[in-house]
Each structure stands twice: as structure tokens, then as C-alpha cells.
Amino acid sequence: MATTDEIYSFLQDFKTKIGIWGVIFRDDRGKNAKALLDLDITPVYREEVLRGLLVTDYYEGPKKETLYGGADMWVFGKTIKGQEVYIKVTLGFAGAQVICISFHVAEHPMKSLKK
């Protein structure tokens, strides 16, 4: 589990990089597309959610990311329209967009830093 300082540092880097390079959403997975339709989440709103992530939204990470070969993956959770949404992100490669690997409704209740 990452420390609060590590999570804060990641989020600062993540949000700075979104502001410069933008974000790529991996929408080619069924559960991601279904969650977006079910919750009526627009691309603009989804980016707002990413920009608004807080340390208290942290779930786990950093974890080795092997699918896209870039930076470590971090997992966050947000409640959107009454549903817990599971969000996996990575900084991606240097000089390129961050990657939102997953954005879907959590299958099980998520634990957070809030105790």
C-alpha cells in the first residue's frame, strides 16, 4: 500500500500530465463501455472525474502494469450516480498521454483510506 505522500505525488504528476498531453481511454473492454452507458457518463465528465481524484479515492497501487508496457498502474474508486466506480490509471509513456485502463462499476465494495 502506498503512503499518503506517494499517492499525493502520483496524483499531482497524473493531473499535470493530463493537462499537457491529455488522456487515452481504453474503451475496447465490454465492462468499461457498459458502465459508461449505464451511468450515462460522457467523455468530458469522465475526464473531470480523473482530474478530481483525491488521495482519499485511492484503492491500491502502484502495481506492475503489463498490458500496455508503460508506468505502474494505480487504482482509485469514486461514487458516481450512486455506484462505486473502479478506475485504473497509469502515467503511460514519457511524452505521451496518461492511460485510463478501466472505468467501470465495482463488482465488490471497495476499501479506501477512509476508516
Image: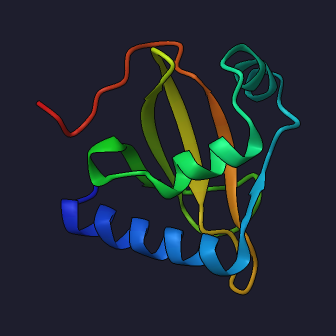
Q: Is residue 91 visible?
A: yes
- Find residue 30 and report its image quarter: top right
Q: Is residue 31 above or below residue 55?
A: above
38 sits to left or right of 109: right
- Find residue 17 and report its image quarter: bottom right
Residue placed most toward the observer, 44 or 31 = 44
Residue 28 percent coordinates (x, y): 88, 36
Q: Residue furthest right?
A: 28
Q: Is residue 63 above or below residue 106?
A: below
Residue 110 percent coordinates (x, y): 37, 24
Residue drawn at x 70%, y 58% is 99
Display coloring? rainbow
Q: How many marks?
A: 0
Residue drawn at x 75%, y 44% is 43
The image quadrant where one finds the C terminus is top left
64 sits to left or right of 37: left
Q: Is residue 81 above or below residue 25?
A: above
Residue 20 percent coordinates (x, y): 66, 81
Residue drawn at x 45%, y 14% is 82
Q: Is residue 114 above or below residue 81?
A: below
56 sits to left or right of 31: left
Q: Residue furthest bottom?
A: 95
Residue drawn at x 38%, y 44% is 60
Residue placed most toward the observer, 27 or 37 = 37
- Find residue 79 and report its image quarter: top left
